[in-house]
Image (cartoon, rainbow, N blue to C red):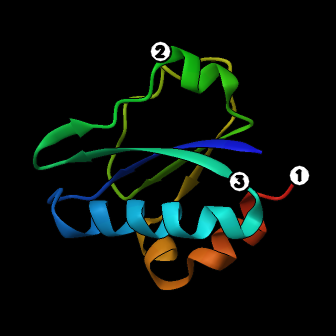
Amino acid sequence: MRIVAVTACPTGIAHTYMAADALIKEAPKFDVKIKVETQGAMGIENLLTPHDIAQADKILIVSDIEIEQSVRFKGRETIQVPIEDVLLNVQKVFIIHCRN
């Protein structure tokens, strides 16, 4: 399974990057290939390309703030996950949202 994710938090500092790291570390345990875009204080890093998005089986938006999705993810189902869920129990997020 291929997943793309976007992580962002209100201040764009710690939680954005902590959530991205948690997703990246947990993904192999579920046989998931993942690419995570961070939208933090440093701007957008690891930008998801149209190809990344097209190849994804699932799209996770891990954020407590509004992420612009209308154009980039048009016609694709996105799963919204509070950033706290990933930080507190990333394994549960994968079990619920990232099974085939």
3 vs 2, front mark: 3
Q: Marks 3 and 1: in contact by CB < 8 Å? A: no
Q: Marks 2 and 3: in contact by CB < 8 Å? A: no
What residue type is disc 3 on?
Answer: Val
What residue type is disc 1 on?
Answer: Asn
Location of residue 12 (image quadrant) = bottom left
Location of residue 81 (image quadrant) = bottom right
Q: Mark 3 points at which residue?
A: 32
- Alpha carbons under labels 1 and 3: distance apart: 10 Å
Which quarter of the rendered picture does the N terminus lie within?
Answer: top right
- Give the mark nearer the N terminus: 2 vs 1: 2
Q: Mark 1 points at which residue?
A: 100
Query: Is 67 placed above or below 80 here?
Result: above
Q: Where is residue 42 in the image (x, y as percent from the top left)?
A: 11, 44
Say left or right for 83 vs 97.
left
Q: Where is residue 24 in the image (x, y as percent from the top left)?
A: 50, 60
What residue type is disc 2 on?
Answer: Val
Which numbered tag is attached to residue 71? 2
- Alpha carbons under labels 3 and 2: distance apart: 25 Å
Say left or right for 9 vs 37.
left
- Give the mark nearer the N terminus: 3 vs 2: 3
Q: Where is residue 22 in the image (x, y as percent from the top left)?
A: 46, 70
- Alpha carbons under labels 2 and 1: distance apart: 26 Å
